[in-house]
Image (cartoon, rainbow, N blue to C red):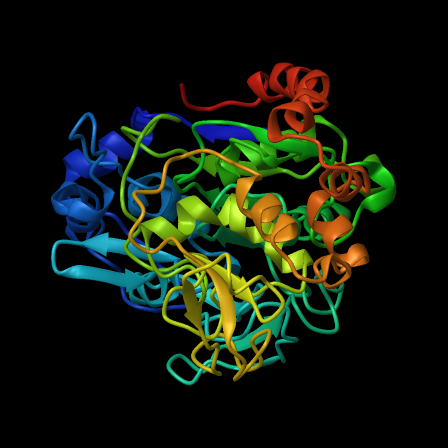
Amino acid sequence: MLLKVFKNTVLFSIIIGISAGTFSCKNNGKQEVEQNTVKHIVDHSNTLAHYVDNDSKKTIIVGANRTAHYIPMLKHKRVAVVANQTSVIFKPEGYTHLVDSLLSLNISIEKVFSPEHGFRGTADAGELVKDGKDTKTGLPIYSLHGKHKKPTTSQLQGVDIVVFDIQDVGVRFYTYISTLHYIMEACAEQNIPVLLLDRPNPNGNYIDGPVLEEKHRSFLGMHPIPLVHGMTIGEYAKMINGQGWLKNDVTCDITIIEMQNYNHNSTYSLAIRPSPNLPNDNSILLYPSLGLFEGTNINAGRGTEFQFQRYGAPFLDKKHYTFSYTPEPNFGSKHPKHKNEMCYGVDLSHVNAERHFTLKYVMDAYHNATDKSKVFNTDNFTKHAGTTTLQKQIEAGLSETEIKATWQEDLNKYQHIRRLYLLYN
């Protein structure tokens, strides 16, 4: 397995460069960049409240902010970046996009690859994103959620290294890890190294849910992992390589820039919504549980300002529920389920969401539907659940405890495998 992980110590060569006071970053005859520019980005990251661990009060320094560790790898290279709106370097005054920062440091970025929701993060879930050009930088953008989910040979032509930096939320059907798989596979096939800048997993303190069955493999789940996988995106990249999940047994040459002061029990607030319909901490913590509604005909708050903080449908029993709302087209959801229809259900926007996965919301909706045949969109629910068994268990009236007991053997096996790839406690 080709894997290089930069730990929480500074490389000797980089220490020498910092102590000398200059850091040359020449590229195609462009001007040199002073070391103090790089040092400024790294040294001031500890002033950012958004990434303070709420328990230890230590600042979590993301991989992207550890600039001194990876800028030398990009000098004199033709670089492609896999990024979206979360790909930022934090500064005391806020943050700058990784692409803008690298360009300012005289790194030669040739092109950008964008995942689901696009480079600036404004497309609907599942919406095909077209290739284009970034209006700010003029860089060509190639969509990995359109015609091609895997970069083509021609798209990677002229690229020496690919930088991957996207905020994940730790759920199998959140498609950024599928994009990671295809990036690693394409780069392995063309002998292009990958540099991954690690970020926290807000649901990284536990694993839960059914493990994906291989026959139900799709872009919503490509590997035999639980619905909540409990890994950072860097750790997940290690697992993809180590478990031999890339096509034709290829292995990606990948370097991971670790975070500092992060562990799997860290709690914090994301500074930027990772996708249009995850607007706040509550939605992110509820997403593993309410995300299963994506495989049903029940609205999970899309078309409101409380995405993944409520659920409802016209066919849920209005005598049972006191809460109702009407989904309307808005940012991130041009065509929400039950658009302009009154939906009856549950409001969770004021609940102090806990970091765990539960079936109680899906089970509640099913048991209180006036027409149960309308609840499940079976094929789509299977893709989200990773198994046909879960829908059958809910329909058969099994309790959550009984259902979860059927996952335990697979979760124990996965837990053993997961330990092999952890970078953080």
Answer yes or no: is residue 350 visible: yes
Q: How many marks?
A: 0
Residue 370, image quadrant: bottom right
Q: Left or right: where does residue 197 sit relative to residue 116?
A: left
**Residue 351 placement (x, y as % from top left):** 32, 47
Vertical comparison of 77 with 326: above or below: above
Answer yes or no: is residue 1 visible: no
Residue name at image x 38 percent, y 53 percent: 348
Residue in front for this viewpoint, 241 or 211: 211
Q: Left or right: where does residue 322 sit relative to residue 290?
A: left
Vertical comparison of 257 with 296: above or below: above
Vertical comparison of 402 with 190: above or below: above
Residue name at image x 59 percent, y 37 percent: 237
Residue found farthest to the front: 319
**Residue 419 placement (x, y as % from top left):** 56, 17
Residue 250, image quadrant: top right
Residue name at image x 82 percent, y 45 percent: 216
